[in-house]
Amino acid sequence: MSRRHQFKSTDEESEVNLTPMLDVVFIMLIFFIVTASFVKESGLDVSRPDANQQKEETRKRSILISITRTNEIWIQQRRVDVRAVRANVERLLAENPQSAVVIQAAEDAENGTFVRVLDQARLAGAISVSIAQSIAN
């Protein structure tokens, strides 16, 4: 009998009481919920412009000069002669002095035409002259 009584007592002692642990977890949960609701992050509200609006502003600030495959020169959607590039760029720079000049030449365009356009843009007073790759095939 004594052996059976001994086994019963070890079975009863092996049970773990989870109530205190659940109480601690519950109190921690309440603590985190209360402290998280009163935390206020400081910062600035930033209103960023839309992508379309930014592209339009970039177009307004830049002077686009295109050279076609047949060596035609286009400035702001108008066909001009190579001798008129300087006057047109000067006029556009007078309207907006911070404008950048972007030259976009077709792959088949002559290098001489490109160099003359680049020189005329520099002589017109353009500080920033960029070269863009032609997208048209």
Image (spheres, grey):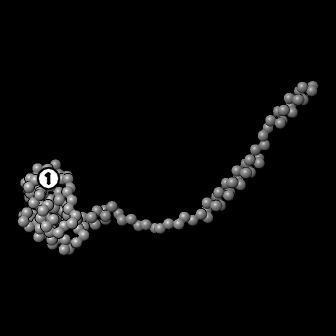
Image coordinates of residue 76 in percent, x first then y, are 16, 65
Instruction: Identify the residue at image location x=12%, y=62%.
Output: 119
**Which sits in the foreground, 65 or 131?**
131
Query: Which residue in the rendered view is the most extreme toward the bottom?
Result: 94
Image coordinates of residue 34 in percent, x first then y, are 65, 61
Seen in the image, is 54 located left or right of residue 104?
right
Q: Tag 1: Cα neighbours inside 10 Å, few (<14), some, or many (≥20)?
A: some
136 to 4, vertically: above or below? below
Seen in the image, is 21 located left or right of residue 76?
right
**Which sits in the foreground, 129 or 35?**
129
Instruction: Identify the residue at image location x=9%, y=53%.
Output: 110
Q: In the image, what residue type sits under mark 1?
A: Ala
Image coordinates of residue 85 in percent, x first then y, are 11, 66
**Which sits in the foreground, 8 or 111?**
111
- Quadrant hosting residue 98: bottom left
120 to 20, vertically: above or below? below
- Number of marks present in the image shown: 1
Regarding residue 3, the answer to whether it shows in the image is yes
Seen in the image, is 8 located left or right of residue 60?
right
Image coordinates of residue 53 in percent, x first then y, are 31, 65
What residue sits right under mark 1 in the picture? 106
Instruction: Identify the residue at image location x=28%, y=66%.
Output: 57
Instruction: Identify the residue at image location x=68%, y=57%.
Output: 30
Regarding residue 74, the answer to whether it shows in the image is no
Quadrant location of the N terminus in the rendered image: top right
- Quadrant hosting residue 86: bottom left
